[in-house]
Image (cartoon, rainbow, N blue to C red):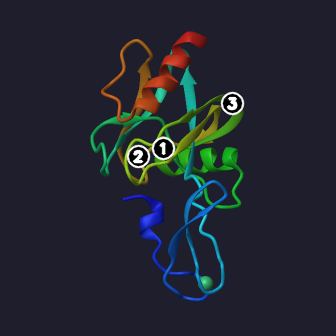
Amino acid sequence: MSLAEIVAFCPRCGARLVQQERFNQLRPVCPACDWVYFADPKVAAGVLVRRGETVLLVRRAIDPQRGLWTVPAGFIDAGEDPAQAARRECLEETGLEVQITGLIDVIFGQEHPRGAHFVIFYRGVETGGRIAAGDDVDQLGFFPLEDLPPLAFTTTARLLETARRMS
Ligand SMILES: [Zn+2]
């Protein structure tokens, strides 16, 4: 189901929305007050943390892709600095405090209906905290880039491939 199909009523006046061409595509439009629904992308931020030749990965404890591995990442709240979102997600999922030291890549591609449309991946270095599996995670650890566990997402695989080329 597309976002346009989920939004049935005008959030401003409550009238039922209709599909009309606005700004070069069909969009839900309110026939009563002319409000137009623009589907904005969902954006996630993640962080790659290294210890020598190894990278920090977390195992997902939730669907989709439960039991598979990815880097600490999550949705950015509206108004939140993406780098801060990456730090926050890392702390929540792994217990580790990190400092963001650079941008690695922005990877586009939604992998499941509730997933992000693109992910902003940063490089981070540990500054403190104590390692412990947290939100939505049941295991975590540092893995050699040449010996990775089964990965959850294509975006994760692409990020780690980039990391391998950079090392
Ligand atoms: Zn309206």
Q: Which residue ends up furthest to the left in the rendered image? A: 67
Say if residue 167 shows up in the picture.
no
Residue at coordinates 43% horizontally, 54% vertically from top-left?
135
Observer-nearest of 144 and 16: 16
Q: Mark 1 or mark 2, which has the lower sequence index?
A: 1
What amino acid type should be assigned to the residue bearing mark 3? Leu
Residue at coordinates 55% horizontally, 18% vertically from top-left?
163
Q: Which mark is residue 94?
A: 1
Residue under pointer 2: 133
Q: Gap in Å between the C-alphas at discs 1 and 2?
A: 5 Å
- Total marks in image: 3
Q: Mark 3 or mark 1, which has the lower sequence index?
A: 1
| 146 to 73, vertically: above or below | above
Are dots 2 and 3 in contact, CB under 8 Å? no
Instruction: Give percent across and percent down for residue 71.
Output: 47, 35
| 43 to 23, vertically: above or below | above
Left or right: residue 61 compared with residue 18 = left
Residue under pointer 3: 103
Q: Is mark 2 within 8 Å of ligand 1?
A: no
What amino acid type should be assigned to the residue bearing mark 2? Ala
- Secondary-structure class at tag 2: loop
- Secondary-structure class at tag 1: helix
Q: Mark 2 or mark 3, which has the lower sequence index?
A: 3
Q: Is mark 3 within 8 Å of ligand 1?
A: no
Instruction: Give percent across and percent down for residue 104.
Output: 64, 27
Q: Gap in Å between the C-alphas at discs 3 and 1?
A: 20 Å
In the picture, the quarter occupied by the C terminus is top right
- The picture quadrant for ligand 1 comes to bottom right
- Please tell me whether mark 3 or mark 1 is closer to you in this view: 3
